[in-house]
């Protein structure tokens, strides 16, 4: 099971509703973000200018470095859902996982002295019925959630329907194998290796 996000960048307007929904749903402190939207561009010269928005959150890596370096087992992969999570009761705040994450998507909660990150709203999705708040509140329908290994899921169908040159992942600096899939067709913009 590979529960993850598929984000259609052809549809993303950069409105930041995913950021707001995430902060409200998860009660995230000011200054901390589990989801960010990066403007890529504009690039090119007039009149041939391209720009797209790139939402970045936990990539739910299949070989997550954050899990490997955690000395207490606080960072772990849920065997039932396949989602990388943090057990705050086991977290000692060492921040090794933050250093190991190649995508910089973990944050330190100063009040609780623990590391936090996107959980794909596991409190909403663990029963297999709900979707993360960012997906539910995406006004452009750019975000999908589901199991990539299930051909009948929305995410698997979206990836299968996309042309191969429109399917992207964030750069993998090692063997992390990020699960989040980004769809960006060349007609919208050229994919840039930013992270």
Image (cartoon, grey):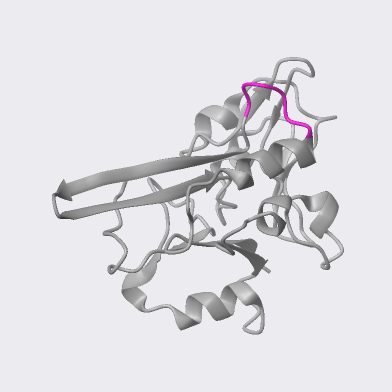
Q: Give the residue at the far front of this rendering.
A: 47
Q: Is residue 176 left or right of residue 4?
A: left
Observer-nearest residue: 179 or 16? 16
Vertical relation: 44 (above or below) 153: above
Residue 99: % across, % down:
52, 28
Residue 83: % across, % down:
70, 54
Observer-nearest residue: 15 or 82? 15
Identified at 80% across, 37% down, the residue is 87
Q: Is residue 92 left or right of residue 161?
A: right
Looking at the rendered image, the quarter that the N terminus falls into is: bottom right
Observer-nearest residue: 102 or 117? 117
Vertical relation: 147 (above or below) 79: below
> For residue 167, what is the image quadrant?
bottom left
Check if residue 195 falls in the magenta segment: no
Q: Main secondary structure of the magenta part?
A: loop
Residue 42: % across, % down:
26, 45
Which segment did they paint magenta? 27-32
Vertical relation: 88 (above or below) 103: above
Residue 147: % across, % down:
66, 70
Identified at 66% across, 37% down, the residue is 117
């Amino acid at each position: 099971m590979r529960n993850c996000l598929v984000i259609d960048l052809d549809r993303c307007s950069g409105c930041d509703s995913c950021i707001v929904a995430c902060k409200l749903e998860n009660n995230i402190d000011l200054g901390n973000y589990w989801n960010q939207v990066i403007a890529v561009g504009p690039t090119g010269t007039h009149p041939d200018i391209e720009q797209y928005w790139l939402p970045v959150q936990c990539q739910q890596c299949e070989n997550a470095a954050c899990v490997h370096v955690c000395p207490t087992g606080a960072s772990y992969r849920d065997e039932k859902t396949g989602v990388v999570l943090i057990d705050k009761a086991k977290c000692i705040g060492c921040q090794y996982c933050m250093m190991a994450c190649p995508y910089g998507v973990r944050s330190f909660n100063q009040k609780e002295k623990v590391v936090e990150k996107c959980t794909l709203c596991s409190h909403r999705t663990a029963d297999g019925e709900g979707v993360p708040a960012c997906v539910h509140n995406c006004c452009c329908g750019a975000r999908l959630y589901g199991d990539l290994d299930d051909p009948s899921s929305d995410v698997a169908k979206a990836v299968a329907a996309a042309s191969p040159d429109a399917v992207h992942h964030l750069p993998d600096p090692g063997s992390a194998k990020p699960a989040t899939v980004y769809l960006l067709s060349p007609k919208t913009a050229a994919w840039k290796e930013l992270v």
